[in-house]
Image (cartoon, grey):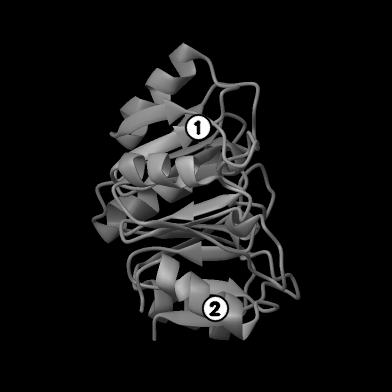
Amino acid sequence: MHIERLDFENSPYLGVFGLATDRVALIREGLQEKKLDVLKEVLGVPLIETSIMKSRIVGLLSVGNSNGILTTYYIWDGELEKIRNSLRELGIDTRIEPMMTAYTALGNLILANDKAALVSPKFSREEVKFIEDVLGVEVERGVIAEYHAVGSVGVVTNKGALVHPEATEEELEWLSDLFKVDVYVGTANMGVPFVGSCLLANSNGVVVGSLTTGPEIVKIEEALGFL
C-alpha cells in the first residue's frame, strides 16, 4: 500500500501536523492508534509522537531529511531531549538541531530531500549555511510560483516531487536539476495548491488528506514515483 487517505482529528492538512523522512516521521501527539498504524504501514518508518512549543503543528515548526531535522529555536528543552532520546533508542543516525532565526514556520519555508534543499530567499547567508550543515545537502534560495513559502507549495522525496500548479516550466526543470527527481504540478484536498500542507510522503509511500480526489491521487502517485 503506497497511498492512503487520512485525516488528523478531522483536519485533512496532514503536512501541518507531521514530518516524514526516509528514516523517521515526527507526528503530533494524540492521534488514534488506528491512524498511527496507517502511518507506520504506508511510510514504513518509525514514528515519534511529539509536540513542539507545546503545539501540535509539528510539520510547520520543523523540516528535515535523512541526515538532519531543523526545528524552531523555541522548542522546549524537554521536547528536544525526548526526540533525541527516541532517535538514539531507535538507532537512527539523524541529528535534530534548533535553528536561531526570526522565522518559526520552518516547514513552510524549506523544501528538502536527501539530495538538496530549496529555502526561502528570506533566510540570510549565515542561516543558509546552518541549514546546509544540518541537512548535509546543497542549499539554494528561491521561490516556486512566486511563493516564498516553498515548503508549503511543494513536496519532495528521493523518488519525486509535486509542486504548486502555477509553477513555470523553467521552475520545474530547475527543481528537477536541484533535487535529482522528476517534478510535477498538482493539487490535493479538492484543489488546494499548497500541497506541502496537505500530505506526508517519503520514498515508501504517501498519506494524503481525506478530501483528496481520485484524479488528484493518480497525479500524486505519478509525481512521487508510485505508478
Q: Residue placed at 34% from the left, 36% from the top? A: 135
Q: Is residue 5 visible?
A: yes
Residue 83 location, x and y as percent? 44, 49
Q: Residue placed at 39% from the left, 63% from the top? A: 202
- Give the quadrant of the N terminus: bottom left
The image quarter in which residue 120 lies:
top right
Q: Residue furthest right?
A: 10
Specify which label sits upstream in the sequence, 2 or 1: 1
Left or right: where 109 falls relative to 2: right
Q: Secondary structure at mark 1?
A: strand
Find disc 2 in the rendering and name its residue. 217
- Viewer-proximal residue, 25 or 149? 149
Kindly check if marks 2 and 1 are in contact, taking CB atoms under 8 A apart as contact: no
Residue 68 location, x and y as percent? 35, 41
- Viewer-proximal residue, 184 or 73? 184
Disc 1: CA contacts within 10 A as few (<14), some (14-19) or many (>=20): many
Q: What type is the residue that disc 1 sits on?
A: Val
Residue 43 location, x and y as percent? 40, 71
Task: State the separation of the CA atoms marked 2 and 1.
Answer: 26 Å
Find disc 1 in the rendering and name its residue. 119
Residue 226 location, x and y as percent? 36, 76
How many marks are shown on the rendered structure? 2
- Viewer-proximal residue, 25 or 227? 227
Q: Is residue 96 visible?
A: no
Q: Residue placed at 65% from the left, 21% from the top? A: 102
Q: What type is the residue that disc 2 sits on?
A: Ile
Left or right: where 7 falls relative to 217: right
The relative height of residue 208 versus residue 24 in the rendered view (above or below) is below
The image quarter in which residue 76 lies:
top right
Q: Nearer the viewer, mark 2 or mark 1?
A: 2
